[in-house]
Amino acid sequence: MGADFLGHARETLNDRRVSNGELRFLGERLTEALRDVLRIAESRGAGRAVAAEDQK
C-alpha cells in the first residue's frame, strides 16, 4: 500500500495541472502516513535505537 501511495504522490507532483487544493490534500495524506510510520517504528523500538546512537 505504501509503494502505491508513493507512486501516486510522485505522479501528482509531476503533473503541472494539479491544483493547490490537490497538493494540499496530498501533503496532508503524506503527513498522516509519515506520522503512522514513525509511530510504528517507535513502538518496535527504533526510537530507542536512534536515541542510543545520538548519545554516543
Image (spheres, rainbow, N blue to C red):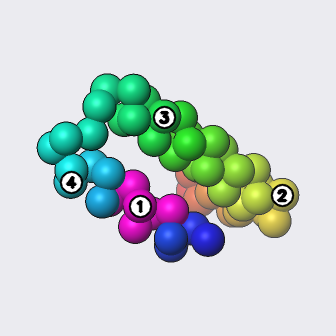
Q: Element under label 3?
A: helix
Q: Earlier in the sequence, mark 2 or mark 3?
A: 3
- Name which residue type carries label 4: Asn
Who comes first in sequence, dot 3 or dot 4? 4
Q: Nearer the viewer, mark 2 or mark 3?
A: 3
CA gap between label 1 and label 3 equals 12 Å
Q: CA distance from mark 2 to mark 1?
A: 27 Å
Which one is in front, 13 or 36? 13
**In front here: 45 or 54?**
45
Magenta residues? 5-10
The N terminus is located in which quarter? bottom right
Q: Amino acid at mark 2?
A: Ser
Kindly identify the amino acid type of the residue bearing the numbered disc 3.
Answer: Phe
Q: Secondary structure at mark 4?
A: helix
Q: How many residues crowd mark 3 within 10 Å: few (<14), some (14–19), many (20+)?
A: few
Q: Nearer the viewer, mark 2 or mark 1?
A: 1
Q: Which mark is residue 8?
A: 1
Q: Amino acid at mark 1?
A: His
Marks 1 and 3, the one that precedes in the sequence? 1
Q: What's the mark number on residue 39?
A: none
Q: Which mark is residue 14?
A: 4
Secondary structure under tag 1 reads helix
Q: Which residue is mark 3?
A: 25
What label sits on residue 43 in the rendered view? 2
Up/down of 19 relative to 7, above or below: above
The nearer-to-camera label among 4 and 2 is: 4
Q: Gap between marks 4 and 1, in whole Å?
A: 10 Å
